[in-house]
Amino acid sequence: MLQLIKIHGLGSSGEGVGKIDGLAVFVEGALPDEEVLAEIETRKKNYAVGRLVEVVKGSSERVEPFCPLYKDCGGCQLQHLSYAAQLKWKRQQVVDAIERIGKLDGVEVFETLGMENPLRYRNKMQFPVGKNLRIGCYARGSHKIIDTTSCMIQNAGNDKILAAVRNVAKKFNLQPYDEDTHKGFLRHVMGRVGCNGELMIVLVTVTKNFPNEKNFVRALLKELPEVTSIQQNVQTFHNNVILGRDTRVLFGKPTIHDKIGNLKFNISARSFFQVNTAQAEVLYQTALDFAELHGHETIIDAYCGTGTISLFMAWKAHRVYGTEIISSAIADAKRNARENNIRNVEFFVGDAVKVMPRLANSVHLPDVIITDPPRAGCDKKVLETFAAMQPDKIIYVSCNPATLARDLKILGELGYQTKKIQPVDMFPFTSHIESVAQVKKVIRKTARLGL
């Protein structure tokens, strides 16, 4: 049944939102201020989902997608919306979350910091491999693989990797992985591009045994002689986790390098590193500005990963301590500190809830806490630990407005006030938005609250 729907907003995944008889309707591909004909495919108690059939009245912000695969591919969600409008909507996502979920008033949310050229920004590719060696993103809402030869949000080096692996895999008749039967060999292709054009290829396979391995590597080097590193990662489990625990180098070096500002970082196959290098510098500079450092401060960086934010902060702080539960990430962080000759940082393996109080009692109460948690945000115990340590400021870096708002509300109940938030567009043409929040203590510093 077709319905004429007036679209008044965008949902968190970039779908148009309208109403039918007071019921919210989500229509993928529709934009605010449009009237569309949609076929209602799903109707629930609190919402409905419609399939866009026709745009009856279009938005002035509607543009022609630049990618021929856009209508099928699930990698991007907003190519049909002008980039300027994307930035406004992403800010609004943050504002809505702060007001509706966080129930916070008086928070200044700045205009989103976007890119001058929002194409070819991704330094990392990880595409699934399917039947007939189809390699690319999944189609929207499915596990059907869209065969891709070029992706305009990927660094051009990743396109080269994609072409080379596809050609050689066909030549050697490598069997693609079938997620239904859990049979086959090649599961994913990961590409990473570093500074100075360094390229890393990671072949994610079901088994450690690599058929005709040496000849395969030779052929891949012939296709792509400039490659820096070729590695195999083994993922044996029947799940949707991309990387397994075991990685071995088939050719070249175990790491490539990238730079954020004046800092150089080692990137291994399993390292976390921001996929948009240019905007990562914008994000970290914002965090540094919000910290308002004068050179005498002690900083604790919870969820420090490979130390990127810690090292970026270190040049303006007295001392920085980073904590991370993943030991390999801490090893990378220590190496990055050494190679950048930064000596006022220390890194510790462990759960932030346990490590941070020990640091506070043995070293110094932090003046600033930096946190950049996963999409799920911080556990309440972590936030309570932050507040118990009574830093003057907490700088919260978030990739999820909803969990950011939830956590800022909890911090408010613990004596901290959110002053300002800066959205940063790390992922143009997608529905994702990164933000930096400055949170300040509004209670007097007293005892260590039992730490």
Image (cartoon, rainbow, N blue to C red):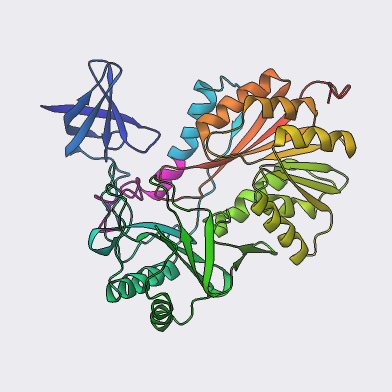
Above or below, comparing residue 398 to residue 21 in the picture: below
Tell me, yes or no, if residue 106 can be seen here: no
Q: Position of residue 75 (x, y in %)?
A: 35, 50
Seen at 80% across and 47% down, the residue is 320
Q: Nearer the viewer, residue 45 or 294?
A: 45
Seen at 41% across and 70% down, the residue is 161
Q: Is residue 42 left or right of residue 237?
A: left
Q: Position of residue 328 (x, y in %)?
A: 65, 54
Tell me, yes or no, if residue 368 can be seen here: yes
Q: Position of residue 281 (x, y in %)?
A: 62, 55
> Picture quarter containing residue 398?
top right
Q: Is residue 178 left or right of residue 439?
A: left
Q: Nearer the viewer, residue 71 or 319?
A: 319
Seen at 61% across and 22% down, the residue is 409
The residue segment tinted magenta is 67-88
> Picture quarter containing residue 42?
top left
Q: Is 179 part of what is drawn in magenta?
A: no
Number of on-image labels: 0
